[in-house]
């Protein structure tokens, strides 16, 4: 029964469940009836039709004062620089960093990153610039010119031949087909380490006590502190986005105690010239592979004592009171097809360093902290964590040891929240406007030959990097992805034409920064549908922000990719539907017609394009896409053991533990499968995911567990979602909380999204509060600042699993449909501005209009 309500007071409306004869709430929060299709809630159509007034990505007003700055957080400690820190948002060790992957702390400003080791006699700062890559134009890697991954020579008819084999035999062999479609990755290249800065003291202290190093994720400041021979030394580091500079500061509690030689080194796969003048070290050269020109400048500013510039390109500081380091870097890369070269980086690097030098250290620090905290401070979550007095690495080791004895041992909420926070910290540090998106290791790499080239892999990995972007209130981080997608359209047109004999544009599964949109000898690279998955991230950004200007800017890329599929889809002779062929379930052969992943991704692309066309008034194209979608095989089938099939034929093995669970795409990240809309496929997806998880030890890697955390959250199984995160902490997390083995950053981002999905979902047409709350967090908790589709910011307090208060800020004035156990009981509704709106309640679901910029609070009323 749906009952309308008028707000009886100026700003308050009350609801008594019993008096209106509505169903009582369900504490699990997921057995309620679906949304009223005739109501005014957050259906996709109503979501897209919302007002477009300006909105802010802000915390709910009730929580803003609690969390707007680090100083407002409870429970503070002392960092390595003597500054106030929040222990619950800080990683800290009492040992020197030795191993890059396991020990060093990352800082970054989007364009580059650095890893801080915290040595005593010798400090090491390894650093990167996102544009320093081998490969691309100018590379003769493998003895062949760079072809962007396109066939050389051309292979007319090869795709049709593979399709014919599939049609005749039902499938084609993975390796044979990879040989037919693949090609050596000539000139693909790899992301490169830029270099290392060393601060070396002439002698080591005889005694060292009170050693501590930390990373305050709330401020983006890394610290080192120790007492050497009775002198307290402190260092502080950060990478500033506002000033495009990496900064270090060294101080001591007694004057004249800082004596170091500062040097910079680089790898041996490049030419290098080191010079120094007036405390400024310049390192410059070319990569041997492709001739890419690079330059770094390091300025050493001593206060007191003496500074000597040495002939070998080092700088020696003696008996100084304090020392500041400013590091800038760049290359002559330009993200412009087909040459990917711009101007000599010298002037830009020099200008950035000179500008930074004109500011005091405190000014640089203040500007950085203000910039960082404006993003990081938007979200607050309390699941019962309490800051520990034990170093973070020891906390993690204790958990791992306990888990080894009893595999059911859960991680502490403190460890779980550190895991959540570092994902947001790393995204802020690796994705800012005007930069490239984070690659497989974000912006951090200490190798000239990193695993998987530190590239952009698009059959889940790059997309996973962006799963937390809008959900956890970091929409600014999407700009690099949108720009990158736009940059590969032009080379993607060539790939579409030469490899697929199609119009539009498409990019295969492995991308570099030089427009590589083609194939390699790996079967998994043949995956034009990966482009459609990438484009979903742009559509999601629109859903979360309701920013029509953004949608209009990315719509041409979406539309042109759909035009590719209009040419490339073929008729399956077995049933007459349109399918992707050849189709390959990621990294899990064989090649077939229309595997579930391929079909789900294209169904998703066409569905979202239709909705985008409605928003933008592109009626003619919308109608053509609707006709195409009507002929498409949607990829949904239930197999012989109740599973969601991975292929069109029932080939699934219930003991298969493959790392990819690509046929779950319709459940997450898509909304093709939901409990409310497609209950039979929802159940089948659960069967498949649980079977794959039970056997996942075969391929127990970080991003796999992160994906499963999100999948179980979508299945409303909070305990299993938490178990995936805890398992990842146990088996796949380095001491510095980077995802292992080896370091691959998507697992960090995926966990952050998974935890947020347990607390808030909005993919099914309504805002669902606490959809998958695990038992271990159920007693009491709260959050503020998470985002829901429809441009809502949401906050919740709960006790005994049931919300006691829900706070919603509406940016755009979209109608709100809210599902929560709170709504199934007695509550009152208030609005910050004006009279509380008229609303409808149906079971545990509430529908109401909102106004742009207004805040709404639902509070439970005692019986």
Image (cartoon, helix red, strand yellow):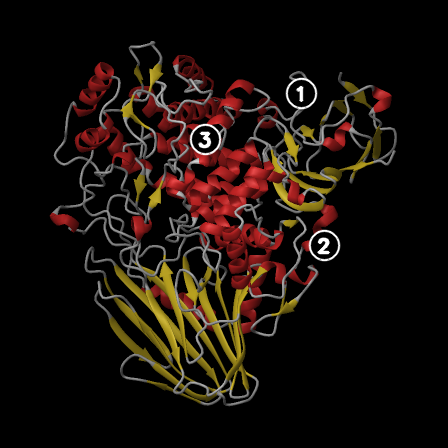
Measured along the vertical axis of the image, is residue 424 above or below residue 586? below
Q: Earlier in the sequence, mark 2 or mark 3?
A: 2
Which residue occupies the foreground of this view, 627 or 743?
A: 743
Quadrant in which residue 644 is drawn: top left
Inspect this view and state whether residue 244 appears.
yes
3D distance between C-alphas at marks 2 and 1:
36 Å
Dot 3 alpha-carbon crowd within 10 angstroms: few under 14, some 14 to 19, many 20 or more: some
3D distance between C-alphas at marks 2 and 3:
43 Å
Residue that label 3 marks: 691
Dot 2 alpha-carbon crowd within 10 angstroms: few under 14, some 14 to 19, many 20 or more: some
Image location of residue 710, percent across then percent down: 52, 37
Element marked by disc 2: helix
Residue that label 1 marks: 33
Q: Which of marks 1 and 3 is in front?
A: 3
Can you say which quadrant of the picture contains the C terminus? top right
Image location of residue 325, percent across then percent down: 44, 74
Residue that label 2 marks: 66
Q: Nearer the viewer, mark 2 or mark 1?
A: 1
Which residue occupies the foreground of this view, 275 or 79?
A: 79
Dot 1 alpha-carbon crowd within 10 angstroms: few under 14, some 14 to 19, many 20 or more: few
**Left or right: 658 with respect to 521?**
right
3D distance between C-alphas at marks 1 and 3:
28 Å
Q: Do the CB atoms of the residues marked 1 and 3 lie less than 8 Å apart?
A: no
């Amino acid at each position: 029964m749906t009952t309308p309500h008028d707000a009886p007071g100026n700003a308050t409306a009350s609801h008594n469940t019993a008096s209106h004869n509505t169903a009582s709430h369900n504490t699990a929060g997921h057995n309620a009836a679906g949304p009223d299709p005739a109501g005014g809630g957050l259906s996709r159509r109503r979501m897209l039709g919302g007002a477009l007034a300006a909105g802010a990505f802000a915390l709910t007003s009730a929580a803003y004062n609690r969390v707007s700055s680090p100083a407002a957080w409870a429970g503070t400690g002392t960092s390595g620089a003597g500054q106030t820190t929040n222990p619950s948002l800080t990683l800290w060790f009492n040992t020197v960093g030795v191993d890059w992957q396991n020990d060093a702390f990352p800082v970054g400003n989007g364009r580059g990153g650095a890893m801080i080791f915290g040595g005593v006699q010798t400090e090491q700062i390894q650093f990167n610039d996102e544009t320093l890559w081998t490969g691309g134009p100018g590379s003769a890697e493998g003895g062949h010119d760079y072809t962007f991954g396109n066939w050389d020579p051309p292979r007319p008819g090869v795709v049709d031949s593979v399709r014919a084999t599939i049609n005749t035999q039902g499938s084609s062999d993975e390796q044979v087909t990879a040989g037919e479609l693949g090609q050596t990755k000539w000139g693909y290249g790899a992301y490169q380490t830029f270099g290392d800065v060393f601060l070396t003291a002439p002698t080591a202290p005889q005694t060292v006590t009170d050693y501590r190093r930390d990373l305050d994720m709330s401020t983006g400041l890394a610290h080192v502190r120790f007492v050497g021979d009775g002198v307290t030394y402190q260092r502080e580091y950060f990478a500033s986005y506002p000033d495009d500079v990496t900064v270090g500061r060294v101080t001591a509690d007694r004057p004249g105690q800082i004596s170091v030689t500062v040097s910079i080194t680089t790898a041996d796969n490049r030419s290098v010239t080191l010079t120094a003048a007036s405390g400024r070290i310049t390192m410059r050269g070319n990569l041997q592979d492709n001739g890419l020109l690079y330059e770094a400048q390091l300025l050493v500013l001593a206060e007191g004592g003496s500074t000597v510039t040495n002939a070998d390109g080092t700088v020696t500081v003696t008996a100084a009171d304090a020392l500041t380091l400013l590091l800038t870097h760049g290359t002559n890369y330009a993200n412009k097809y087909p040459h990917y070269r711009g101007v000599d980086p010298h002037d830009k690097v020099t200008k950035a360093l000179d500008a930074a030098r004109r500011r005091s250290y405190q000014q640089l620090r203040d500007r950085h902290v203000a910039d960082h905290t404006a993003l990081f401070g938007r979200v607050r979550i309390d699941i019962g964590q309490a800051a520990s007095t034990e170093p973070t690495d020891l906390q993690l080791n204790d958990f791992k040891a306990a888990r080894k004895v009893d595999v059911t041992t859960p991680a502490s909420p403190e460890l779980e929240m550190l895991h959540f926070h570092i994902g947001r910290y790393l995204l802020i540090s690796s994705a800012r406007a005007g930069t490239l998106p984070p690659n497989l290791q974000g912006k951090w790499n200490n190798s000239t030959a990193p695993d998987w080239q530190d590239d952009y892999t698009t059959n889940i990995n790059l997309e996973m990097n962006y799963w937390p972007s809008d959900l956890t209130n970091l929409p600014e981080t999407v700009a690099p992805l949108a720009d990158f997608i736009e940059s590969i359209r032009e080379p993607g047109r060539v790939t579409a034409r030469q490899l697929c004999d199609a119009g539009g544009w498409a990019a295969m599964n492995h991308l570099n920064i030089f427009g590589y949109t083609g194939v390699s000898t790996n079967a998994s690279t043949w995956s034009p549908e990966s482009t459609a998955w990438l484009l979903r991230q742009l559509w999601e950004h629109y859903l979360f922000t309701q920013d029509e200007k953004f949608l209009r800017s990315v719509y041409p890329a979406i539309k042109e990719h759909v035009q590719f599929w209009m040419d490339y889809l073929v008729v399956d002779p077995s049933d007459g539907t349109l399918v992707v062929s050849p189709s390959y379930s990621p990294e899990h052969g064989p090649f077939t017609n229309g595997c579930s992943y391929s079909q789900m991704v294209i169904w998703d692309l066409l569905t979202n394009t239709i909705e985008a066309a409605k928003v933008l008034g592109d009626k003619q194209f919308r109608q053509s896409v609707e006709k195409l979608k009507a002929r498409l095989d949607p990829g949904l089938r239930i197999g012989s053991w109740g599973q969601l099939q991975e292929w069109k034929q029932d080939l699934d093995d219930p003991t298969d533990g493959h790392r990819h669970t690509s046929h779950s795409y319709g459940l997450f990240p898509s909304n093709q499968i939901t409990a409310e809309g497609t209950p039979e496929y929802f159940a089948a997806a659960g069967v498949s995911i649980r079977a794959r998880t039970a056997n996942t030890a075969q391929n127990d890697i970080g991003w796999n567990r992160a994906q499963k955390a999100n999948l179980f959250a979508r299945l409303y199984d909070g305990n299993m979602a938490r178990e995936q995160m805890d398992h990842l902490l146990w088996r796949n997390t380095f001491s510095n909380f980077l995802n292992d083995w080896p370091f691959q950053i998507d697992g960090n981002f995926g966990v952050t999204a998974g935890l947020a999905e347990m607390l808030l979902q909005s993919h099914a047409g309504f805002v669902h509060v606490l959809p998958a709350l695990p038992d271990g967090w159920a007693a009491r908790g709260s959050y503020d600042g998470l985002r829901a589709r429809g441009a809502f910011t949401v906050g919740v307090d709960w006790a005994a699993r049931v919300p006691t208060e829900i706070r919603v800020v509406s940016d755009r004035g979209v109608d709100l449909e809210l599902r929560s156990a709170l709504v199934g009981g007695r509550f009152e509704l208030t609005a910050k501005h004006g009279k509380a709106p008229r609303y409808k309640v149906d079971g545990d679901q509430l529908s109401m209009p909102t106004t742009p910029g207004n805040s709404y609070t639902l509070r439970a009323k005692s019986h």
